[in-house]
Amino acid sequence: MDLINLAIAFFKVGLLSIGGGYTLIPIIKNEVVVRNNWLLEEEFLQILGVTQGIPGAISVKLATYTGYKVAGILGVIVAVLSSMIVPVVLMLLLYSVLLRMNKIPYSDSFIKGVQFATVGLLISFAYKALSGSNFDLKGMVLAFIAFLVMTLTKFDVAPVIIGAGIIGIFLFR
């Protein structure tokens, strides 16, 4: 039953993966924390933070962790493949449409709407992550510094996450 639930949950993630990787975070959290109780909220946020320093898609990394926790290697295979089915099939089916996207009326307006919705989803996730975790003043300062570094520089995400982790070793003893 766990494998079926994993397949259904991550199929939904793949089905709803419009807008890019970070828009998936609230969807995945709903499936793995709220609906199926596979991860605690704090565990989800920890894994999300740690996996930011690992290359690859957010959905694949979280599917891998969750799948392994729930059902071992077979759970990993089921969760990852289930999350990828819909996007892969749609890309194969819609390839020719994407090549001609600039000829479709209102396509630019549609994409602009999706971009703003993505920003709203990210702000919503940030708000929920902050209100649902035990951030203290040191954590807020570290989060603000990471925000400034990512906003004002051309640093890649991975060194910022790894650097914050190293700082965290000393800051949160």
Image (cartoon, rainbow, N blue to C red):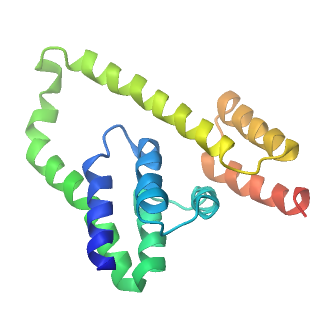
Residue 95 placed where, x, y %?
13, 42
Residue 24 placed where, x, y %?
41, 47
Q: In this view of the protein, which residue sits in the foreground, 114 or 52?
A: 114
Using the rendered view, name the quadrant where residue 107 is placed: top left
The structure residue drawn at horizontal position 42% and vertical position 85%, both measured from the top left corner, is 72
Q: Is residue 106 visible?
A: yes
Look at the image and tell me in which quarter the N terminus lies: bottom left
Q: How many marks?
A: 0
Residue 63 placed where, x, y %?
41, 66
Q: In this view of the protein, which residue sits in the foreground, 100 or 17?
A: 17
The structure residue drawn at horizontal position 8% and vertical position 38%, both measured from the top left corner, is 96
Q: Is residue 97 above or below residue 139?
A: above
| In this picture, residue 82 sits left or right of residue 61 | left
The structure residue drawn at horizontal position 34% and vertical position 78%, both measured from the top left corner, is 2
Q: Is residue 57 visible?
A: no
The structure residue drawn at horizontal position 45% and vertical position 62%, both measured from the top left corner, is 32
| In this picture, residue 48 sits left or right of residue 32 | right
Look at the image and tell me in which quarter the C terminus lies: bottom right
Residue 81 placed where, x, y %?
27, 68
Using the rendered view, name the quadrant where residue 84 is placed: bottom left
